[in-house]
Image (spheres, rainbow, N blue to C red):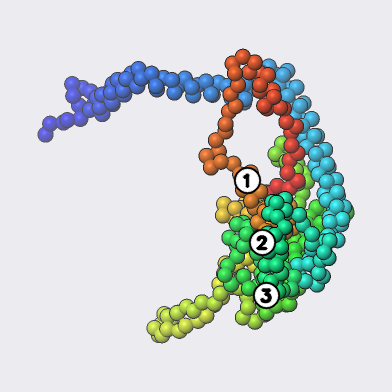
Amino acid sequence: MADNSFSDGVPSDALEAAKNATNTEKLTDQVMQNPQVLAALQERLDNVAHTPSSYIETLPKAVKRRINALKQLQVRCAHIEAKFYEEVHDLERKYAALYQPLFDKRREFITGDVEPTDAESEWHSENEEEDKLAGDVKNKVVIAEKEAATAEEPNPKGIPEFWFTIFRNVDMLSELVQEYDEPILKHLQDIKVKFSDPGQPMSFVLEFHFEPNDYFTNSVLTKTYKMKSEPDKADPFSFEGPEIVDCDGCAIDWKKGKNVTVKTIKKKQKHKGRGTVRTITKQVPNDSFFNFFSPLKASGDGESLDEDSEFTLASDFEIGHFFRERIVPRAVLYFTGEAIEDDDNFEEGEEGEEEELEGDEEGEDEDDADINPKKEPSQPSECKQQ
């Protein structure tokens, strides 16, 4: 049988490799003659050549030594900034005490325990001037109609479903609320923010106050968010202010058969030996807003959380921050929807596109100075999510 593995004393594998190499060289030559490919390669080389890290590597050792000294100064700045935010927290605590009497009165009006006076309930609307222009005759008709309507209108106590309406209005909260949560949230009377005492680790507590109801015996449900204001030893340059690092919930004393955070399912089991089938019931977790009070714990033993757990924890921190910074201080505006409209007005475009202002070629620098005055740098957020 003829041996095909050699041709003129050269192995066939070597011949095949030579052919492939020749073809590759031809293809490479064709590609390199393409001006678009050459431009793309040049752009990539330019980008690599001009990265900050590559530039730093080209500096003399003496300059690198001085840069390291600047980094040490930057770390010291981060620690001073951390102290600044600790004092900010003390100021928050001080002013929270000044806000609280107003929030207490807000609760009294909402629950109907106190009726506001005429002076307290007076509010000048934006349409007030237009109403005056309508004329005396029209005003008399409107007043008569209002009086007749008022006589027929019901007069409920306080502001019914105040906090529940806020939950419905705010997307971040409404996504957490299930249909079976709604009757419970209608019993929510107040939400308070309490800051940690002086000398204690930085934290804040959300208190959800409920009137007596058929679902649980707790009058207050709490969620504690623990914070820190210190640069990370491994990455001090990432410090941007206090951050939430963990949170604790509370036990809810559910009345029998009223726990919406679990559901009962039936499951059939077959005996391996006898072949008989039995039906058992078991409780499994159920989606509910009230899982908010049984939060996932941040890993404290050095083990990293999986991606889903990290997302869940970050979302929890974001919600806690939103309650503290927006919902509680501006509750009435989230009830009416005015705060939501304001937030929508400041959202970025869907494409995230930026518009560039073009000035005349002559005197363009002067135009830019008028249009784009230098802005003072803003302080980092008082609290960021981990």
Q: Quadrant of residue 309?
A: bottom right
Drawn side of residue 25 relative to residue 130, left or right: left
- Mark 3 or mark 1: name the one nearer the start of the chain: 3
Query: Circle 3 sits on which residue?
Result: 152
Say which of marks 2 and 3 sits in front.
3
Q: Work out whether residue 297 or residue 95 is closer to the camera in this orientation and state it.
A: 95
Q: Can residue 127 be seen at all in this image of the molecule?
A: no
Q: Measure the C-alpha gap from mark 3 to mark 1.
A: 38 Å
Residue 19 at least partly seen: yes
Residue 80, quarter of the rendered image: top right
Vertical order, 382 against 160 (above or below): above
Q: Nearer the viewer, residue 226 or 301?
A: 226
Give the labeled residue for mark 1: 345
Q: Secondary structure at mark 1?
A: helix
Residue 348 position, x and y percent, is: 59, 41
Tag 2, which secondary structure? helix
- Residue highlighted by disc 2: 166
The quarter of the image holding the N terminus is top left
The answer to which of marks 2 and 3 sits earlier in the sequence is: 3
Disc 3 residue type?
Glu
Q: Position of residue 238 (x, y in %)?
A: 70, 39
Gap in Å between the C-alphas at discs 2 and 1?
19 Å
Q: Label 2 is placed on what type of residue?
A: Ile
Query: Mark 3 or mark 1: which is in front?
Result: 3
Q: Is residue 338 above or below residue 362?
A: below
Residue, x 80% and y 72% (percent of image)?
113
Is 222 in front, or is 326? 326
- Residue at the image position 66 percent from the left and 21 percent from the top: 367
Residue 338: horizontal and vertical position, in percent?
67, 53
